[in-house]
Amino acid sequence: MVFSYLLSTPGGLAPRPAPAACYYSYSSAPCRARLVAGGRGGRLRCQAQGGARDVDGHYIRRCVELARTAAGHTSPNPMVGCVIVRDGRVVGEGFHPKAGQPHAEVFALRAAGDFAENATAYVSLEPCNHYGRTPPCSEALIKAKVKEVVVGMTDPNPIVASKGIEKLRGAGIDVRIGVEEALCLRLNEAYIHRMLTGRAFATLRTTLSMNGIVMDQIGSGADQPGGYYSQLLKEYDGIVISSNMAKTTALPISREAGAKQPLYIIIAQGEDSKLHIPFLHEDSVSNAIVLADSPVTVQPAGVSISVLDQMSLDSILQLLSERGLCSVLVDFRDAGGSLASLLNNFQEDKLVQKVILELSPVWMPSPGPSNLAFGGSQSFPLKNVEHKEVNGTLLLEGYVQ
């Protein structure tokens, strides 16, 4: 979901602007013609290079780029981008900025105005066809009299589930599906996972020394603006940390512009009756939740507490999904802490979808056997593994099969 864009940026994950504006013009059409700001003012014409499929792919990729602008802000909704093209030029763009606000298609159609008629609408995810907090996007596209709609992928949400496509086709609009589908799937992998499993998408992150010892610190610059860790905190809905980390370390924050800080999910397993979180300010207590296996009093007051009948990663991910979280980062820094037991058999139980490992060029004193002796009873390969060196550390990411 996040790490793939790290490979294209020397300093870490590609920084993205905060979603302050939700529609604007685009200056990189296939013909490289530039549309003036404002969406409607441009009058440049060009001939598309390559076949129709290449043109479709170009604009869907732009939709994905727009959608990422709102990374970390849309849950429980997906990230969606939309581009309106008429006579070979972009006349409107938009993205979904956050849950409860209009969808990408609405912003793009507003920017296009009357130029949306007989245009082609490109959208990274199937337009909705139901009334929720906003009206159906399928009706907005029909009302605007667009001629074609190109969809990156269908929506796994059973409320949508191809109904938007059927609505558009029933209105006589030509609909093409599955353009740049793999890219669109990865964009919303957390949203898709939550829809299909009822659990939040979990990524395990840890830092290891050269001799395989879990470290309680991250690499130089990783938590600064543009650093990979700061980017992860911006894009994930929540971060799971041990109570030991919460008691002894400043809570991690994203330093990206416009970042919405993740929900702090603090695991209190086998704790005393009191838990003091010294670095949690009183004005931030609503952004933390303590999950405990027995009743516990938390300071500062006001922190949400849930006592679980069964302390397991499965139950935690289901609970977080019910709270509207699509993605969580499991930040493993304490080898002997409460998180290790939660991660037993995570591969066999399909509870962790991705692993991000930071390898630090440090040789640590060895306290004993491997600190990462969990995950399953058998070895398993990671797939789609990517790597990059940043500030002297090696970052590795792979998906759990």
Image (cartoon, helix red, strand yellow):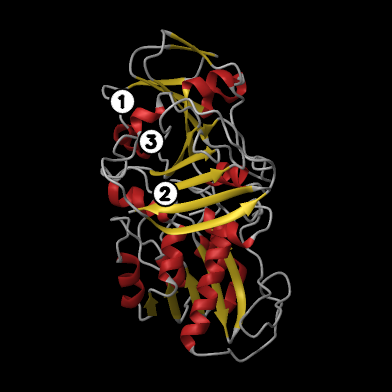
CB of mark 1 within 8 Å of CB of mark 2?
no
**Circle 1: element type:** loop
The type of residue carrying mark 2 is Lys
Spatial CA distance of label 1 from label 2 is 21 Å
Left or right: residue 299 compared with residue 369: right
Looking at the picture, how far across and down is residue 217, in whole percent? 60, 32
Q: Write down the residue under mark 1.
A: 311
Q: Which mark is residue 320?
A: 3
Spatial CA distance of label 3 from label 2 is 17 Å
Taking 66 as reference, is 117 above or below it?
below
Q: Is residue 19 visible?
A: no
The image quadrant of residue 175 is bottom left
Left or right: residue 317 compared with residue 95: left
The type of residue carrying mark 3 is Leu
Q: N-terminal of the two: label 1 or label 2?
A: 1
Q: Write down the residue under mark 2.
A: 354
Count of number-bearing discs? 3
